Structure formats: C-alpha cells, structure tokens
Amino acid sequence: MLDELLLGLIAFFTSTIAGVVGLGGGMLLIAVLPSFLPLNAIIPVHGLTQMSSNISRAVFSYKDIQYETIPKFLIGSLLGVGLFASIISLISLEYVPLFIAIYILLSLWSQKFNEKIKKYENYYLVGFLQSGLSVVVGATGPLSMTLLLKDYKNRDKVVATSAALMSISHILKVFVFIYFGFVFFDYLGIIVTMIIGAILGSLAGTKLRNKIDGKRFTFLLKILLSALAIKLILSLFI
C-alpha cells in the first residue's frame, strides 16, 4: 500500500512538471519505475499512466490544441506501431536512445542541421518514430515537442498539442501490450493510484503554466530537452 501511495505522489509530481513545461514527466517517471516494478511491467504501466496524464492535459487545454497536426501524426503513428510491434524481437534497439538524443540536440541548437532536415521533417515521420519507438523505449515525447517548438511559439499551443500527440502514442502502445497479453489487472492498485495522481498533476500543471513568462518558457523548454537528451546519452555509457 505504501508503494502504491508513493507512486501516486510521484505520478502527480511528474505530471505536474509535464503540465507546466510540456514534457519531462514521462522520462522522470520511467527512470523511477524500475525501483518499484519488474522489468516486464515498466513500459506497459508507464504507458497507461502517461496515457491518462496526456489525455487529461489535452482535455484541460483543448482550446489550444492545433488539430491540423493530428491526422498526419496519427497516420505515421499507426504505421510506426505496426512496424515496430512486428519486428521488435528481430532488431537491436540498444542505441535508439542515442539517435533520439543526437536528433534533439542538433535540432535545438544547430541552424545548419535544421536547414538540411526541414524538407524531411514532418508530423508523419515524427508520428512514425515517436509512437513506434515508444513501444520499446517508453518515453519519446521530446521528438514531437522538438518539432512543435519550431512551429508554434505560444506555450499553451505547444503544451496542449504535444499532449494530444503523445496521447495517440500511448493509446496505441497500450493496445499493443494488451494484444501481446500483458495483464494490467495484476497491477490494478498501482495503476489506479498513478492514474489519479497523473490527472491531478495535469490539472495542477495547467493552472501553474500561465505563471511562467513566454520567453522564459521557450528557453526553459530548450534547456530541459537538452538535459533529457544528454541524460539519454550518458545512460548508454554509465
């Protein structure tokens, strides 16, 4: 019971962070879960919790969602999840986090990289990679957030649209694990407390978001994305 309450509080804290900044909560949460759950349950339970966090955050900010991004992202996501779910046992994914991290850092700080990649970068591709890789990596939100940060300068639009796109990724991921036979009911107590914490955290984060200056938000988001990318790189070598 103590673990369940603690995980509920952690879910609240990480969801609040995501509600304010737009991301980071999922990566923080997945870093904590190995201390509480067996390895085979980490990504499924994380996915269901993050699904609740992102859906609730999108609902609380539905007026700011840029809906034109959703059809493109959804098509890419369906293709990505279908492919990665079918070949998951055939490929080595050890260095996937490294490629994600390098993409994030170059995209945020290299003007030359952005000029070259612009003709290839789109929501179809981001949906394909984010949703497909989420089946095996867990937290891939920075991929879509990096693109959204380029397209929209308003923080509410960025956070709300990111929540909607990440909801798609997590919903599809949950269905994949159900298809492969993962029994969510075995972790019902933990899941319920984490979902409650995640929804309350989304509400708190949405309320707190407007307290942050827009320019500071953009700078903070870039710093957080960079820190998460560096963490991904270091985790491979330490």
Image (tube, rainbow, N blue to C red):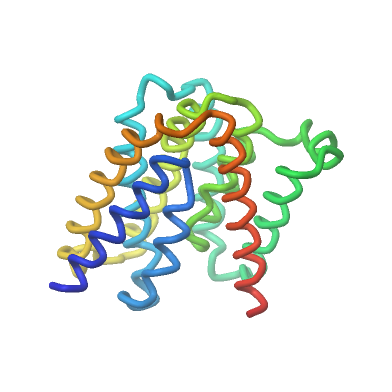
* 111 versus 189 height, above or below: above
Which quadrant would residue 29 be assigned to in this image? Answer: bottom left
Task: Identify the residue at image location x=29%, y=46%.
Answer: 201
Task: Identify the residue at image location x=28%, y=53%.
Answer: 12
Name the outermost residue toward the left: 1
Q: Position of residue 143 (x, y in %)?
A: 59, 46
* 14 versus 70 height, above or below: below
**Quadrant in which the C terminus is drawn:** bottom right
Nearer to us in this view, 230 or 54: 230
Q: Position of residue 134 (x, y in %)?
A: 50, 55
Q: Position of residue 6 (x, y in %)?
A: 23, 67
Whether residue 103 sits left or right of residue 189 in the image: it is: right
Which quadrant would residue 215 be assigned to in this image? Answer: top right
**Quadrant in which the N terminus is drawn:** bottom left
Task: Identify the residue at image location x=18%, y=65%.
Answer: 5
* 32 versus 106 height, above or below: below
User: How many numbered circles are shown?
Assistant: 0
Whether residue 171 sits left or right of residue 110 in the image: it is: left
Whether residue 188 sits left or right of residue 37 in the image: it is: left
Q: Position of residue 165 (x, y in %)?
A: 47, 37
Task: Identify the residue at image location x=47%, y=58%.
Answer: 27
